[in-house]
Image: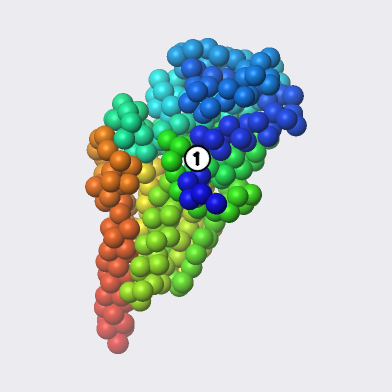
Amino acid sequence: MSDIANTRAGFRDGLVALAEKRDDIVFVSTDSVKVVKAEDFAKRWPERMIEVGIAEQNGVAVSAGLAASGMTPYLCTYAGFLTMRACEQMRTFVAYPKLKVRFVGVNAGLFGGNREGVSHQFIEDIGILRAIPGFTILCPADGDQVKQAVLASADTEGPVYIRIGSGKEERVFPDGTPFRIGKIRIIGSSGRDVALFCHGFVTNRVIRAAAELEKAGVRATVVEVATIKPLDVAGISEVLGKCGCAVSIEDHNVIGGLGSAIAEVIAEHAPATLARLGLQDRYGESGHPDELLDAYGMSTANIAETAKALVARKKQGLRRFRTEQA
């Protein structure tokens, strides 16, 4: 089994699997057939393949019309060209009337940096869509998880955004592992010293960091938050209550993404200490994805050292509290 699980192919495979069973599935392309290697879909179901060219706003409007007519359109193109160029149409034509359009955003995060650079790296997409009422936001970890998310999204009410990458992502889960919308997943837990919250293409890094922490005597709980909205507040609160401190790791701006979502839970439901790793309110640059993640503070060592610092801080606070009580 290959260690690479192509997220673009995962979308295509999920779309084909749905189309084989359902006549309402439509692929709306904004010059993105080759992006996801969906030529086979176009040949098999030409009547359910709509190409609008490089016209993302038009693609969203066409998708809204299809959804209003009882079809289930999947619109796939670069993440930023959807969430920025066509944001108004996504909000007003789809989210406001609660239409069932599924948006799939390619090249999310830094993963496109080795080919296309900052113009095709999108680190703001989650923050933009979190602010729009009614959106479901999914961030699968690998190619087959994208496929499973596509299958799970078919009957979800209202608009759905599925965040995918460049096509060179590491495999995280065995093929066929179900994707459950709206719930966190505990990937590994050696104890309650610190929680590591993550999603998407950094997940394997976090798993490796947890292994390094265990060697150093720090027991971490790794939590995948693959549904950013609706957020599993109860599940996250339970983990925070047990651990008392957490690190969020995301290939996204720390403002508006996973770290912000965890901070909101902490503020309103489960007081804890949080460190946010991600893009620190800055743009990316061209380079190999792994090198970029390292350069922007998301290396395995960065994650482990940040977690150690939080645990030390927590223990110091507990010692101070016990001294004061005595």
Q: Secondary structure at mark 1?
A: loop
From the viewer's side, name the closer residue of 122 and 155.
122
Most distant residue in the front direction: 1
Name the residue located 37 percent from the left edge and 38 percent from the top edge.
Answer: 111
Name the spot of residue 182 as percent of width and height, x first. 58, 47
From the viewer's side, name the closer residue of 178 and 167.
167
Location of residue 312 with respect to 223 vertically, above or below? below
Name the spot of residue 145 as percent of width and height, x first. 56, 45
Location of residue 297 with respect to 29 vertically, above or below? below
Number of marks:
1
Most distant residue in the bottom direction: 326
Q: Is residue 81 left or right of residue 324?
A: right
The three-letter amino acid code for the residue at tag 1 is Asn
Report the residue marked by disc 1. Answer: 6
Name the residue located 28 percent from the left edge and 72 percent from the top edge.
Answer: 312
Name the residue located 42 percent from the left edge and 35 percent from the top edge.
Answer: 166
Q: Is residue 91 left or right of residue 102?
A: left
From the viewer's side, name the closer residue of 58 and 260.
58
Asked if residue 266 can be seen in this view, the reply is: no
Name the spot of residue 132 as percent of width and height, x first. 48, 31
